[in-house]
Amino acid sequence: MAQESGGVGNAPVALLLIDVINDLEWDGGEQILPQAREMAEKLSALKQRCREHGIPAIYVNDNFGQWQSDFRRLVEHVLQDGVRGEYIARHLAPADDDYFVLKPLHSGFYQTTLSTLLDHLETTTLIIAGMATDYCVLFTGADAYMRGFKIHVPPDCCAANRAGYHEQALALMARVLKADLTPSDELDLDSLAESDRAERASVGGEGA
């Protein structure tokens, strides 16, 4: 059964897209580009599946030091200014009803409103994807784990500068953060939501 979208308490599962709106015009940006292009195609398909199941997409994006900018202007820049990251942004451009959070550093939770938003949505399970696997995805996953979230990190929906860094970070998240590494096209989105509901019902029954 698909979830209904919108409203408090209707999003036990949420998709976090980490730094996917990114011009990649920085030292080493060319190294991540090939893997990022493959990631964008897989993540775009996953995002569409999530939308069909009522799972909200939350863009958690670095402001890249542009303190006088905002997320919409960042999207316009990456789509219109002929930058390396345009291909990724065209596949993953946000819809009007997607959420977004700007972050100043690696973790999506550090000095942001992400925790407040997830509390509002009553989210307990996170699908974390984006760039870079060994930096912002890893740091966001660690903070999510410490806050008690269940974590899914589909390997084909993340990218790093080097394949070795990508694999090392995934192995670390699986071992330390108990992250599920099921590939995106094998994720059973219905089961994720139903498992969350069953667990809530069980906890509620025990406390009754």
Image (cartoon, rainbow, N blue to C red):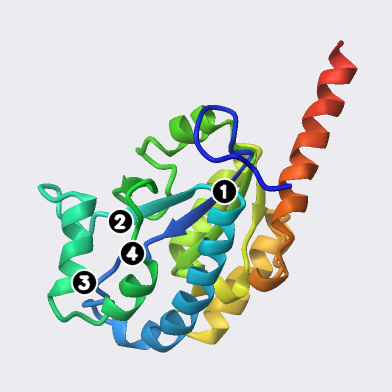
Which-is-in-front pick, marks 1 and 2? 1
Q: Hey, which residue is sitting farthest right in the picture?
A: 206
* Residue that numbered label 1 is attached to: 55
* Residue that numbered label 3 is attached to: 79
Q: Distance between the residues labelled 2 and 4?
A: 15 Å
Task: Residue at 66%, 38% (x, y): give it.
Answer: 148
Could you tell me residue 24's position as x and y percent?
A: 27, 76
- The answer to whether residue 196 is above or below residue 51 is above
Mark 3 touches mark 1? (CB < 8 Å): no
Number of residues whose C-alpha sits closer than 10 Å to that of mark 1, classed few (under 14), some (14–19) or many (20 or more)? many
Task: Residue at 21%, 71% (x, y): give it.
Answer: 79
What secondary structure is found at the residue carrying circle 1? Answer: loop
Q: How far apart are marks 4 and 3 (CA)?
A: 9 Å
Which label is found at residue 62?
A: 2
Mark 4 touches mark 3? (CB < 8 Å): yes
* Residue that numbered label 4 is attached to: 93
- The answer to whether residue 177 is above or below residue 133 is above
